[in-house]
Image (spheres, grey):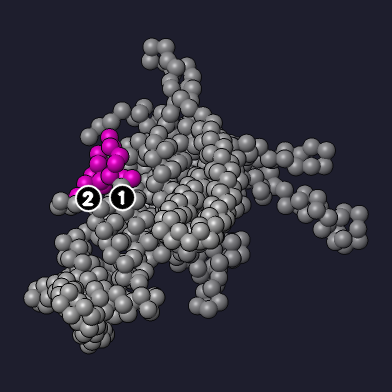
Amino acid sequence: MSQDKSLYKNAIGVRLITKGKTILKTEPLYDPRQQYQRRFDQYSSDALKVDKSIQVISNLRLLIFMAFIFCAVMIYRTADYYLLGLELVIGVLVFAGVVLWHNHLHQKNDILKKKIEINSAGLKRMDGQWHKFKDTGEEFIDHGHPYSWDFDLFGPNSLFQWICTCHTFYGRKLLAEKLCEAANSVGQIRRRQEAIKELAGSVDWRQELELHGVLSDTGSDPHKFLDWSCRYEPTFKSGFVVAIFRALPWISFSIGSAGYLFSGTMVCFAVVYTLQLLLYVLLHAKAIRAIESFQKNGPMLLAFSRLLRTIENKDFNSEYLKDLKLKFGSEGKPASGVFYSLSKILNAAEVRNSPMAHLFANAIMLWDFQCIIKADQLKKKYGRSFRVWIETIGRFEALSSLSIIGFENPHWAFPYVSHDEFFLKGEGLGHPLLHHQVRITNDLPVQRGGSVAIITGSNMSGKSTFLRTVGINLVLAFSGAPVCASSFHCPLVKIYTSMRINDDLSSRVSTFYAELLRIKKMVEAVKRGENVVFFLDELFRGTNSQDRHDGAVAVLNALSNDKSIGIISTHDLQLCELSRIDDKKFVNYHFREQYKDGSITFDYKLNSGESKTKNAMFLIKMIGIYNDNHPGGLQ
């Protein structure tokens, strides 16, 4: 299906000022900083008011308690016990109401503080102060992955740390997967783009979704609960036994009540409840095994029910979001209602943490059996959907995180990802993890299939950063997010890199051999006929200069074909000679530096042709390692 490419050159929230078909300028439809600041100020003001109310209620509680005691003493001295009883009832009810209101204010205050934190994080992202965010996604670091380590996708100062607002286990996991796994089709990417565009404008909804995640412990792995939900056999298999357990507490109560009415004693209650307790003791082991398989998940399910309700109450326009929402469909009861009901059952089972209450609850109600039976009933009806529901919550969280990029950077463009035009091109391309005040943008000239861009330049001139700039924007493009560019065109490809190479002493792998293993994967992908974009930074730095050159030439010839595009950086200026042999396959670019008054500066702008400068000795002298006037040169 063909689509207008210009749609993908326009950023989120940008109005095009045109004259006829000519775009004169662009203006943002909104100011993301202003939106964050407005919410931050409003929630801060509300929190201050609630704090004052909490202080007033705290003082009021003390006054009510003192007045309650004073009145009770005065009435007691009059010997009016009827009035004293009435005063006690009224006093307890009033005090309980004030306590409940006090607790409500504390809960409201907690919510406001989390909302303040959410908007404060947004302001920090916009100010480039996100590097101290706690969630770095460090557990997703994989040095063996084709590109994630080289492009700083995880760990401190990473893409994940910058954008992640996921708080559920599956949300974080699926966001990591979206950054590491290429989409299967262009259509899938475009569906994600439409979803991310829609969510970018739904600020209040995104913040509500994040709020329910951050208020509860939803980050732990729910595998034990999901394992229980997949075991479809009930704890008590006989329907007759279940009916007996459900009816027995009421039968026992009826027998005890009848005995009390006819005999005036509690003997019948004592007998029937002792028998029920003995029945529980006989089946205690079975009940414990069942409850331990799902216990302590009540708060998590309550949080999931709130997340689900937030999604259920939202009407989406994009087809991808509509399809995701359909996964919450269930017969009769909404998914949020199912998890809410199950959370109440699981929380009720926690009475076993109080031994005395647990003893009486099982003697009177066969409490554990009732919890198990109700949980099994919900599991039987809905258990097959639990994993899908929880994973789909995670997918919404991941999309919400990716949509933050476009919301906070309204001038960034959605890329045009093509399935039939095999070339790579970018205009105004910048590194998304650099703050806009220090970010230098470059145009990436058209790189067609079979071409290799050879980038030379002196130390610190920006070669490696440019490779990462192109690479991380490709990652964003394939995830469905906007990219840090005014326009970006790319084919659907597999990404391979060889940039940060480390030896592995435990496996007896040298730096050179580790680099060979990564390059082998690239060559194998090219031989399989995959569409590939590869990034190589200083090929074979672990060997001598002649070997390095010969090896690089061999690798580039092996990697370059009609289905591959390469971008490499090197100090080996001899590689630039390849463009004289085949100027369609090899194209030279360079970064340069300027010298003035004994200092060196860089403009970090990409230029055509090969580099003509070098700066190693200048830098060595500049930091004082070498001195021309010192004997031997060394300081």
Image: 105 above or below 411: below
Residue 563 placement, left or right of 158: left
Q: Position of residue 534 (x, y in %)?
A: 44, 52
Q: Give amino acid for label 2.
A: Pro
Image: 169 above or below 608: below
In terms of secondary structure, where does tag 2 sit?
loop
- The residue wearing badge 1 is 308
- The residue wearing badge 2 is 334
Task: Tell me if mark 1 has few (under 14), some (14-19) or many (20+) residues whose alpha carbon lies within 10 angstroms of its own.
Answer: many
Residue 451 lies in what quarter of the image? top left
Q: Residue at x 22, y 34 (%)?
A: 1
Q: Position of residue 528 (x, y in %)?
A: 30, 58
Instruction: Give the magenta part as a residue range.
Output: 310-329
Residue 80 placement, left or right of 64: left
In terms of secondary structure, where does tag 1 sit?
helix
Q: Is residue 201 visible?
A: yes
Q: Residue at x 48, y 31 (%)?
A: 411
Asked if residue 635 lies in the magenta stretch, the reply is no
Residue 362 placement, left or right of 47: left
Q: Is residue 242 visible?
A: no
Q: Position of residue 99 (x, y in %)?
A: 48, 54
Asked if residue 315 lies in the magenta stretch, the reply is yes
